[in-house]
Amino acid sequence: MSEFLAEIVHHIMHHSLKLFPFLFLTYLVMGLLEQMSSARTQKLIQNAGKVGPVWGSICGAFPQCGFSAAASYFYVGRVLTLGTLISVYMSTSDEMLPILISERVPVRTIVAIVVTKVMIGMITGFLIELTFGWLRKKERVPVPLAKGQVEVCTSCCDHKEGVLKNAFKHSLRVWIFITIITLLIEVIVEGIGAERVSSIFSDTPILGEMIAAFVGLIPNCGASVVITQLYLEGIIGTGPMLSGLLVSAGVGLLVLFKENKNTRESIWIMVILYGTSVLWGVLFQAFGIVF
């Protein structure tokens, strides 16, 4: 048993040590992009108006630290509509994009996943506007945001430390998480069998998407790391992967529940996000769409 575990740990460490430089480079580039685009993106989304879901889904797809949290603040401040908020949540990649890039997944596959999330975010956003717009029509009086509030909430990293240090700290944190998750997956797969584990997500219709989306609701980077790694390991298919990543809005929901005084409304938003994410995953799985 000890030899079995030692072999797994050696294999995983050998792979993950090669992964770290790619993670660091990816987060460094993303940090530089964020510095250049963050203020413009926030201004663009604030002035989006009726086409909010379009810009919300596009802006949400860009690798920006805590943009879903900013969207939550804007929604509470009556700057964004519900449809725009949902579009941001669904297109936000969280840790998915850097992991896919670092694992050297084909560019075509990465682009297909990102574009799919953006299009789903747009479509869902407009459908939400038509169906659930009443959630905000009752009360349209703007609520002023505290000075500097949005800037604080969007900083999941300490920008005062500099891009280089932030990139290293973020890479190390995600690398440790990936290593732990991969180790757990390997132990479970070797102990139970890959087919048996995969069958949990594929044999029972809808169940796999529901489980993946439930994991995606966890309000930290761990959720998207787990979903992405399960997909890369071949444990889950396109449907569960999409459901889990569509609902994974980083700390966006956490900020929404913290700042929105109407808890019932926040619960409604979470239920809508979860339900639509599961539905999209089921549709992709049913039609056999793969990336």
Image (cartoon, rainbow, N blue to C red):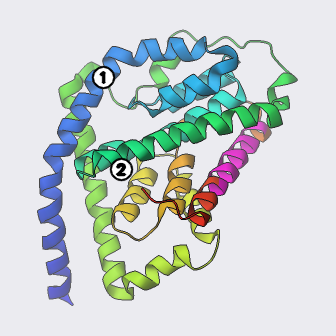
Characterize the magenta stretch by its predominant secondary structure. helix
Q: Residue at x 45, y 33 (%)?
A: 61
On screen, 283 above or below 127? Answer: below
Q: What stretch is highlighted in magenta?
A: 265-279
Horizontal side, residue 101 vs residue 229: left or right: left
The answer to whether residue 256 of the structure is visible from this angle is no
Q: Which residue is drawn at 67% across and 14% down?
A: 49
Q: Where is residue 202 in the image (x, y as percent from the top left)?
A: 54, 75
| Spatial separation of the CA atoms under disc 2 and disc 1 | 22 Å
Q: Where is residue 70 in the image (x, y as percent from the top left)?
A: 53, 25
Residue that sits furthest to the bottom in the current view:
1
Residue 269 on the magenta span: yes
Horizontal side, residue 122 vs residue 180: left or right: right
Q: Name the residue under label 2.
A: 109
What residue type is disc 1 on?
Answer: Leu
What residue type is disc 2 on?
Answer: Thr
On screen, 71 above or below 16? Answer: above
Of tags 2 and 1, which is closer to the observer? 2
Sooner in the amino-acid sequence: mark 2 or mark 1: 1
Asked if the residue at tag 1 contacts the one at tag 2, i.e. Cβ–Cβ closer than 8 Å, the answer is no
